[in-house]
Amino acid sequence: MVFFTTPELLEIGDIPFNTAHFKPTRQEALEYYRRVAEHYKLRIHQYQWVKTITGKDGDFHVTATDQCSGIHDYRARKIVVATGYYDLANLLGVPGEDLPKVFHYFREPHPFYDTDVLVIGGKNSAAEASLDLWRHGAQVTLVHRHAGLHDNIKYWVRPDIENRIKSGEIPAYFDSTVTEIGNDYVLINTPDGPVELKNDFVFAMTGYHPDFDFLTSVGIELSTEQCRPVCDPVTLESNVPGVYVGGVIVAGSRTNEIFIENGRFHGKQIAAHLKQKLGAVA
């Protein structure tokens, strides 16, 4: 994967992001952020999931579990929730979506060589997955509920996917929706009527959303329409004293409003308020 933006717009912690490319790759970004974590000696507890946050400002109790079902308890004076939105996929809500052949995340194309793959979606993730699968020998079909691909597809990806669709190398059904997923087929509702396709695997690249249930379990209030956490726009402290929100979750369900480019400044906003409250070096 190649980022939309240039390296300097991904920088955090006043650490330069050096890359040989005009636009960095996913691997380069991961390496960069790992180096930042090492530089600042951040204490990161890998593969632990926070289950509950209780207590009050200045004395919070955090309970987490690990991949072996072990329980870990932590105490904290302040909490920052920056959980992003990739953990929870937007589900289709159709029969068969729970089959093991259905994926909501795309990692690599090789296991799907010479298989019939359906990709659902019309944005960057769907376009890039379709192209990667097709280039590695899968028979790919694209389905999108709107009349065409999304306007914000990366400019170097758009002509590639459009040419594959135009040539018939990647058949596409627009204004269409998947209505059922079977063990070896999918049913699609198209403008010309129902269509049944032979199918081995499905990639539903239909987007993701923050864990709103977790936010409310902490006591954070959400706006009615867009599920935005109630917070101070400058300090990012939520309606729960001592609990801050940062990153894309600040936008609620409008996940297209905050990216790394603008969300990366949230840390400094929060740190400035913590310095004021705790007297620590921010």
Image (cartoon, rainbow, N blue to C red):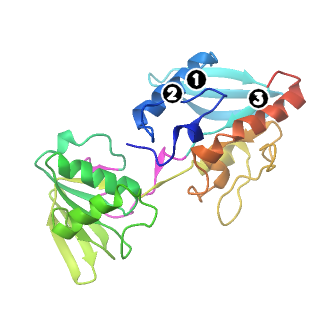
Side of 38 relative to 89 (left or right):
right
Q: Residues within 10 Å of mark 3 (few under 14, many from 20)?
A: some
Which residue type does callout 1 highlight? Val
Q: Which mark is residue 140?
A: none
Residue 1 position, x and y percent, is 37, 42
Asked whether residue 100 is drawn in magenta, I would say yes
Asked whether residue 37 is drawn in magenta, I would say no
Which residue: 76% across, 53% down? 230
Residue at which label 2 appears: 32
Q: Secondary structure at mark 2?
A: helix
Relative vertical location of residue 42 with respect to residue 121 in this rendering, above or below: above
Q: Nearer the viewer, mark 1 or mark 3?
A: 1
The disc, 1 or 3, on the residue closer to the chain's N-terminal end is 1
Which residue type does callout 2 highlight? Tyr
Residue closest to the eye, 168 or 52? 168
Residue at which label 1 appears: 36
The answer, for residue 45, to whether it is visible in the render is no
Residue 270 position, x and y percent, is 77, 36
- CA gap between label 1 and label 3 equals 27 Å
Q: Are marks 2 and 1 in contact (CB under 8 Å)?
A: yes
Please tell me in which quadrant of the rendered image residue 12 appears. top right
Residue at which label 3 appears: 60
Side of 58 relative to 33 (left or right):
right
Which residue: 16% across, 67% down? 168
Residue 151 position, x and y percent, is 44, 67
| Magenta segment boundaries in residue numbering | 85-103
The disc, 2 or 3, on the residue closer to the chain's N-terminal end is 2
